[in-house]
Amino acid sequence: MKINNSHHFFLLAGFGTISCLTNPTDGFSSSVSAGASSSRVRPAWTSERRRRVGTTTRTATALRDSAENDPIDNTQRLETLAKIANEALSSHGTEIFKPFHARVAVIPPSNDDDDDDYDVPRQFRRLGLIASEPVSKADQTIAAIPFYDSDGSGLALAPHLATKVVYKDVLPEGYDGWTGDIGLLAMLLLNEMARLHVDAATGDASPKGVSDLPRRKPPVQSLMNAYVAALPSHREMSELHPLLWNEEEQEILQSSSTKKIYRLLDDVDDDAAWLEETLWNADRRTFPETVSLRIRSPDGTDDDDDDDWIEERPCFSPEGFRYAVALVRSRSFFVDGSLRLLPFLDFANHGDFDSYEISGGGIGTLWGSAKGAFLKSGKALNVGEEVEISYGPKGPAEYLLDHGFVPGMCRHSRRGGSAITAELTFEVDDGDRFRDDKLDVLEYETYDLAPMDPSQSFDVVGGVGSTGAPDPAMIQFLRLVKLGGRDAFLLESIFRKEVWGFMSEPVSEENERDVVMGVIDACEKALEDMEGED
């Protein structure tokens, strides 16, 4: 990722668009972000708390200049990984996929002028999916994978498999880390890497981790092994993902966005520290700090060192956990009510247009129907054309923190197109005399909505493409948060089942003024934080 003065300005402009509230001609609107933030007490995110040793990250220009020698753009390495994945798919794909009409391939750098330094992945060769059969129309299924949620005997990984299957006898009952489902998926991924561990001197298999779980048939396990081998290395992720960027770049990002990377890093580091002290250090034979994976091309020979090498990866350690969390954030999908890793489907790269998100549904099998995930084409494709998916309707800050890049669709406002986003968080104050009543409304009386946390985050959108109207969901929540004084009678039990509906309309002039001032105060506070961390 290129981090320089112009990049810093873009981040301030792109993620700090809340300043539009002090410039009414720009307008603003908002939408509920994917998932509300939980209410937590954290120390201040000062730079001193974030001093860390990290891989030095070069600029995008420097990376391009050293493309032949750098693993981020090592064509031979990527071709070997693609061969490993495709060999497994050819030999065992029918055991699990229903169907898989694609192949893993090395995708060349984009020649599109719209792909500038903010969309780093498109500047380099990378793995992706290409159609192996003609696709005649949009909405045609390219690949489908069943979940096997009960025992994890398939390829798809879900958080509950960590607590109920793999680490069932290791983690305490009710374990709930700061990183939530992402952390549980990261632990599953680390275990799959550990199962592939080899003796670095001999190259012989020496499985680590909870090596016999989940139990899979040999063909399915072969697919999982090929998938894990083909994942980006730690060094590659250090170049591409913010969680593994160096300290200087993380500080720039922290001071440039309302979606704070230090909050995320604190969550990751706190979970890693607890796991290391409580679990990993107690049994380093099972949970090694690093593992060695043998990467070998299916058509290589014993004398061909270029197609056969030992790759060391951090594993059950703070650095390994951060590496796994970065992989999960960049590759997971929310499907059928759960966050999931979907091996091989996740090789599909993001496309802004003519692309669909991964979706859930029923998959026909020999024994009936099973729940699973579908990858569908957004357009007709010829054999060899890239299969792209949508990573979802996220703002630029979320794309950057999840995937390490900002796609063009989030940057159109720079060219006079649609709006850009920031994030604001509001919560019911701990000192609110009516807090219990408001929490009761949020938990039980939000009609067809799921119970709501007392802290909610919203994406705020501004710029040329914005309508200027704030999101009704944000205003509705804030009206309840600010409810008090002469309006507090609406919290009486007689109105309890109707009060949430009442909040969709103005309550009183005083309440509406408090809502507007609440938004303005949040915006000014976010801008002050940016200036204070510059």
Image (tube, rainbow, N blue to C red):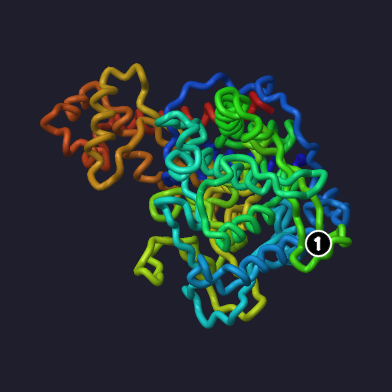
- Measured along the vertical axis of the image, is residue 32 above or below residue 261? below
| Relative horizontal placement of residue 534, taking residue 443 as reference (left or right) | right
Q: Which quadrant holds the C terminus?
A: top right
Percent from the top left, x then y, of residue 183?
Answer: 53, 38
Residue displayed at 58% across by 57% down: 221
Percent from the top left, x then y, of residue 459?
Answer: 47, 43
- Measured along the vertical axis of the image, is residue 527 above or below residue 155? above
Q: Specify few, some or many for label 1: CA neighbours under 10 Å numbering under 14, 14-19, or 20 or more.
A: many
Residue displayed at 42% across by 38% down: 36
| Relative horizontal placement of residue 311, taking residue 502 as reference (left or right) | right
Residue displayed at 74% across by 48% down: 236
- Measured along the vertical axis of the image, is residue 98 above or below residue 469? below
Q: Secondary structure at mark 1?
A: helix
> Mark 1 is on which residue type?
Thr
Q: Is residue 285 visible?
A: yes
- Measured along the vertical axis of the image, is residue 431 above or below residue 266? above
What is the tally of numbered marks visible in this picture? 1
| Relative horizontal placement of residue 202, taking residue 358 as reference (left or right) | right
- For label 1, the residue is 75
Residue displayed at 72% across by 53% down: 120
Of residues 183 and 219, which is closer to you in this image?
A: 219
Of residues 534 and 312, which is closer to you in this image?
A: 312
